[in-house]
Amino acid sequence: MDMKTLIIGIDPDVDASGVATINQVTNELELTCLKFFELYKYLTEHKDNIKLVVIEAGWLNKGNWHKIRGTANINAKIGERTGANFEVAKKISEMCDHLKVPFKEIKPLLKVWKGPDRKITAQEFEKQTGLKGRTNQEMRDAGLIALAYRKMK
């Protein structure tokens, strides 16, 4: 019998990644933000129960972000931050590989919500999940990733 019941969605970020964990048996969803080595500890502690870690891999999008209007300095900062987040995602994939935890890199989910840049708002997330309480954008994005894979066999 397969006792691996956890699906973990991760929205990588340089400061603290959004992490959402769904238990496929209880359907319970937990959200948090973890710094890089806190995430390592979390995955290590749960590795025997993890069915899949799903990591947002922004580099899989073929984007043209550099055509955003703004000064060259603003665009350079956006590019720097984007590249740093991509590297964090790649290191999280390496971490999963090292821990022998199954993982999948996915394109960012389509942004079809009402928030700025069409990201999901706290109210929309609460309506979709029933979860009450404060959440930040990374937590909500990680939650959407985990929810998209919760029924995986």
Image (tube, helix red, strand yellow):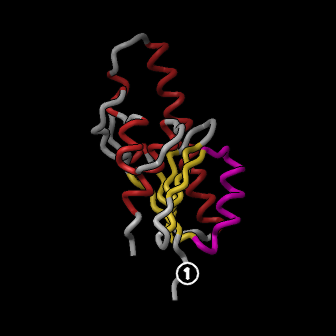
Residue bearing the label numbered 1? 3
**Front residue (pair 153, 28):** 28
**Front residue (pair 85, 43):** 43
User: How would you classify the magenta stretch by its main secondary structure?
Assistant: helix
**Front residue (pair 1, 65):** 1
Q: In which quarter of the image is residue 48?
A: bottom right
Left or right: 99 as drawn, with respect to 102: right
Left or right: 100 as drawn, with respect to 57: right
Residue 138 located within the stretch drawn in magenta:
no
Q: Where is residue 138 in the image (x, y as percent from the top left)?
A: 51, 40
User: How many marks overall?
Assistant: 1
Give the secondary structure at mark 1.
loop
Q: Quadrant of residue 15?
A: top right
In the rendered image, the residue lying farthest to the top is: 71
Q: Quadrant of the C terminus?
A: bottom left
Classify mark 1: residues with Cα within 10 Å, few (<14), some (14-19) or many (20+).
few
**Disc 1 residue type (three-letter):** Met
The part of the chain drawn in magenta is 33-49
**Front residue (pair 98, 136):** 136
Left or right: 64 as drawn, with respect to 80: left
Instruction: Look at 55% across and 54% down and name the residue there.
Output: 30
* Whether residue 69 is situated above or below residue 136 in the rendered picture: above
Q: Where is residue 85 in the image (x, y as percent from the top left)?
A: 54, 39
* Whether residue 75 is situated above or below residue 134 in the rendered picture: above
Left or right: 84 as drawn, with respect to 75: right
* Whether residue 37 is situated above or below residue 103 in the rendered picture: above
Instruction: Look at 62% across and 40% down and name the residue there.
Output: 16
